[in-house]
Amino acid sequence: MAENKITQEQLEELQKGVSEINQIALQIGNLELQKHSLLHQGVEKQQDLGKFQNKLQEKYGPVSINIQDGSYKLIENEKVTEPEAVEA
C-alpha cells in the first residue's frame, strides 16, 4: 500500500510555521513571568511608600506635599457632620 505524504517543501513550511508559533508562545510565557514579577515589585513599592508617608505624617502631621520641590501645606481638618435624621 502506498504511503500518502505531503511534499518535502510543504512539510518544511508546516514545520517552520509550527516552530514560529511555539517560539511566540514561549516569548509570551516569558513576558507573563516578567509581568508577574513586576506586579509584585509594584505592590512592594506601594507598601514601602505607604510606610514612608506614615513616617512623614508622624513628623509633619496631616500635610499635602509637593513632590516637585518638597514644599508642603497643612491639610485642614474638615468637620465631619452627622447625617440628618429623616423623619417618616
Image: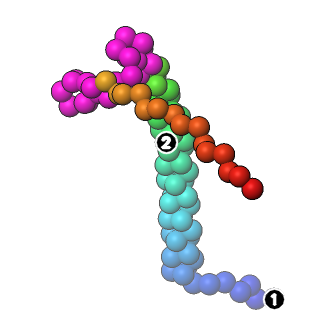
Magenta range: 52-73
Callout count = 2
Q: Residues within 10 Å of mark 1 (few under 14, many from 20)?
A: few
Looking at the rendered image, the disc whose residue lies closer to the viewer, 2 or 1, is: 2
Q: Helix, strand, or loop for circle 2?
A: helix
Left or right, 55 with reference to 85: left
Asked whether the beta carbons under mark 2 and mark 1 sit within 8 Å of each other, the answer is no
Left or right, 84 with reference to 63: right
Q: Residue at x 45, y 19 (%)?
A: 54
Snapshot colouring: rainbow
Q: Helix, strand, or loop for circle 1?
A: loop
Which residue is the site of mark 1?
A: 1
Residue type pointed to by label 2: Gln
Residue 10: percent from left, percent from top: 54, 81
Q: Is residue 52 visible?
A: no
Residue 45: percent from left, percent from top: 45, 28
Of 54 and 26, nearer the camera is: 54
- Does the magenta run of residues contain 66? yes
Residue 53: percent from left, percent from top: 41, 22
Of 75 and 47, nearer the camera is: 75
- Does the magenta run of residues contain 61? yes
